[in-house]
Image: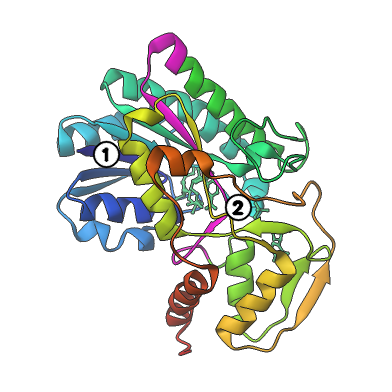
């Protein structure tokens, strides 16, 4: 198969590239490096079946089309993962975030139609905002502040979903949407501001862990290998055409409890520094994955403790600190 991955120098996109290459496919990776790094593609770039093109998916489609044509003579599957994803990153890049999920998604849909390719759009649990239903099922419409500090991301992803469904209904695009819940693992940017790299980096440096609010808010953390397996199954399935699928791990934890687990795994004493809760930070989040189980036969296999062990090992190897 011939696969185009946008956002492929990022955390999730680079793991996706490695997986499709390992499965024997051809991959073109497009990225403008706004939050990604070529370091993540070090192994992929050794592979003759891989081609990287530095391009902004909101505009540089001549470059992407040329790479797709020269490298694979066409494309069968487009995985649209380009977008800042950390609250700190999208607060720093609100315009770019809105553009890549709106204009960028439209460009991906048009390119897919032109090449008779399938599209998978990476949406997010943020579509549910600060949810009033728990756990979150795909049918839930969410509780989103349309102009708050997270709105550039939440509303852009919701718009992206609407756009994908308009292309599906009016142009018969073969498309599906996944809503990803907090995913973590090796290759997260140390300073991207998300809770996993923050806590792991702080613990390894022997610094206090920075809990926002009282730490009673919850998240459900999915190890990246589990997410990748879910994405590959969703992209390969005819049954997911026109369907939204939650992908995440339903093992819900309070952030304070998560801090305790990070300190346990890093074998550091628990020390906390509290600061105020950011505006509109969701109070609870946990995926209902009934649909993913039924359609894809998928559920996460890696426990939080095991996933964190692997993540800490990767972070500490890079930092030169033996566990
Ligand atoms: P990331 O920041 O590590 O990766 C995003 C990549 O997209 C980066 O390499 C960045 O340079 C690239 N990019 C951004 N705008 C671009 C543009 N206009 N043109 C080309 N490239 C562009 O983030 P991630 O965690 O890997 O997230 C990947 C995707 O998954 C995003 O769409 C995100 O919204 C979605 N998602 C991730 C999570 C998660 O927990 N990691 C949760 C929900 C949704
Ligand atoms: N958080 C925290 N300390 C940090 C970073 C994040 O307590 O150093 C909290 C944040 O307020 C949120 C949760 O951890 O409630 C997850 O934050 P993250 O930025 O990873 O992702 P989100 O799920 O909010 O998009």
Q: CA distance from mark 1 to mark 2?
A: 25 Å
- Name the spot of residue 190 as percent of width and height, x first: 54, 68
Left or right: residue 193 compared with residue 76: right
**Viewer can see residue 9:** no
In the rendered structure, the answer to whether residue 246 lies left or right of residue 257 reads left
Looking at the picture, how far across and down is residue 288, in whole percent?
A: 59, 44
Q: Which residue is mark 2?
A: 86
Q: Was residue 172 drawn as part of the magenta stretch in this picture?
A: yes
Q: Where in the figure is residue 25, as x and y percent of width and height?
A: 19, 45
Residue 195 sits above or below residue 49 on the image: below
Element type where label 2 sits in the image? loop
The residue drawn where x is 37% and y is 20% is: 110
Label 1, secondary structure: give it. Answer: strand
Q: Residue at x 29, y 54 (%)?
A: 19
Q: Give the vertical position of 195 relative to 227 (above or below).
A: below
Question: Which quadrant of the structure image shows residue 236?
Answer: top left
Farthest-out residue, top: 170
Disc 2 within 8 angstroms of ligand 2 (CB): yes
Boundaries of the magenta span: 168-189
- For disc 2, the neighbor class at 10 Å (few under 14, some 14 to 19, many from 20) is some
Q: Of label 1 and label 2, which has the lower sequence position?
A: 1
Q: Is residue 260 above or below residue 56?
A: below
């Amino acid at each position: 198969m011939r696969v185009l991955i946008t956002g492929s120098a990022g955390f999730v996109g680079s793991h996706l590239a490695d997986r499709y290459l390992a499965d024997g496919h051809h991959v073109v990776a497009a990225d403008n490096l706004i939050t990604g790094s070529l370091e993540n593609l070090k192994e992929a770039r050794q592979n003759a079946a891989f081609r990287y093109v530095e391009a902004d998916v909101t505009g540089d489609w001549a470059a992407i089309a040329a790479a797709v044509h020269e490298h694979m003579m066409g494309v069968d599957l487009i995985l649209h993962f380009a977008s800042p994803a950390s609250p700190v990153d999208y607060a720093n890049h609100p315009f770019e975030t809105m553009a890549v999920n709106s204009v960028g998604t439209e460009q991906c849909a048009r390119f897919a139609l032109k090449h008779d390719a399938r599209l998978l759009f990476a949406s997010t649990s943020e579509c549910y905002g600060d949810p009033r239903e728990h756990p979150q099922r795909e049918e839930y419409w969410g509780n989103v502040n349309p102009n708050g500090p997270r709105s550039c991301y939440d509303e852009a992803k919701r718009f992206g979903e609407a756009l994908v469904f308009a292309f599906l209904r009016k142009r018969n695009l073969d498309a599906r949407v996944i809503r990803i819940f907090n995913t973590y693992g090796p290759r997260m940017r140390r300073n991207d501001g998300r809770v996993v790299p923050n806590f792991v980096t702080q613990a390894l440096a022997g610094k206090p862990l920075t809990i926002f609010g009282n730490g009673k808010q919850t998240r459900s953390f999915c190890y990246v290998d589990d997410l990748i397996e879910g994405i590959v199954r969703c992209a390969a399935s005819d049954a997911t055409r026109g369907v939204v699928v939650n992908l995440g791990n339903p093992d819900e934890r309070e952030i304070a409890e998560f801090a305790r687990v990070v300190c346990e795994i890093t074998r550091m004493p628990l020390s906390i520094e509290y600061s105020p809760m950011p505006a509109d930070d969701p109070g609870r989040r946990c995926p209902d994955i009934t649909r993913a189980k039924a359609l894809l036969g998928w559920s996460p296999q890696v426990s939080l403790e095991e996933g964190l062990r692997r993540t800490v090992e990767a972070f500490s190897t890079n930092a030169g600190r033996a566990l």
